[in-house]
Image (tube, rainbow, N blue to C red):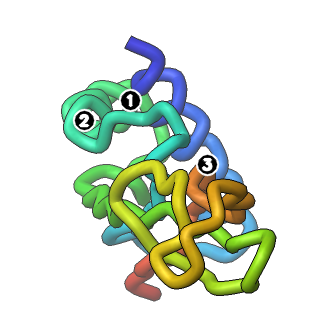
Amino acid sequence: MHELSVAQALLDTVDRWQKENGGNVLSLRVEIGRLAGVDPEALAYAWPMALGASENVHLHGCRLETEMLPLEFSCTACGRRVLSEKLVMICPDCGCERMRHLSGRELRLKDIEVEHV
């Protein structure tokens, strides 16, 4: 399960941020593209394990929130942008079969919620 290594990498990033900025980290929000190869349920399962291994008491109890991002495509013929939950091969406007993939592979730490003490 590579989600444990993803959880650890997120935790390492938040740990560095917390040490530089202070406060108790309450939660972090992660955006996951549908083609990122990260299962949000497996990541949620791995998060407490990674968190439990941290020595930084300012991270204990930190919640992980995930948001799945849709896929985004652009038609090479008419330029229409299409958001989809699935792979799109045909433009819904002009019927062109050449759709350019724009997004969907992201794994981005979006927000860190902190309580300053």
First in sequence, mark 2 or 3: give its number: 2
Query: Considering the numbered disc 1 on the image, is that residue within a helix, a strand or a loop?
Result: helix
Residues at marks 1 and 2 touching, judged by CB atoms closer than 8 Å:
yes
Q: In the picture provided, is 89 more to the left or to the right than 96? A: left
Helix, strand or loop status at disc 2: helix
Graded by Cα atoms within 10 Å as few (under 14), some (14 to 19) or many (20 or more), the crowding at tag 2 reads: some
Residue 85 x, y percent position in the rendering: 34, 60
Residue tagged 3: 105
Q: Is residue 65 above or below residue 59?
A: below
- Distance (Cα) linking label 3 and label 1: 23 Å
Which disc, if any, is residue 48?
2
Residue 63 in the image: state x and y as whole percent: 26, 59
Instruction: Residue at 74%, 84% (x, y): give it.
Output: 79
Q: Which residue is mark 1?
A: 50
Q: 4 above or below 21?
A: above
Query: In percent of the image, x 74 and y 67: which residue is there?
Result: 20
Residue type marked 2 = Pro
Dot 3: element? loop
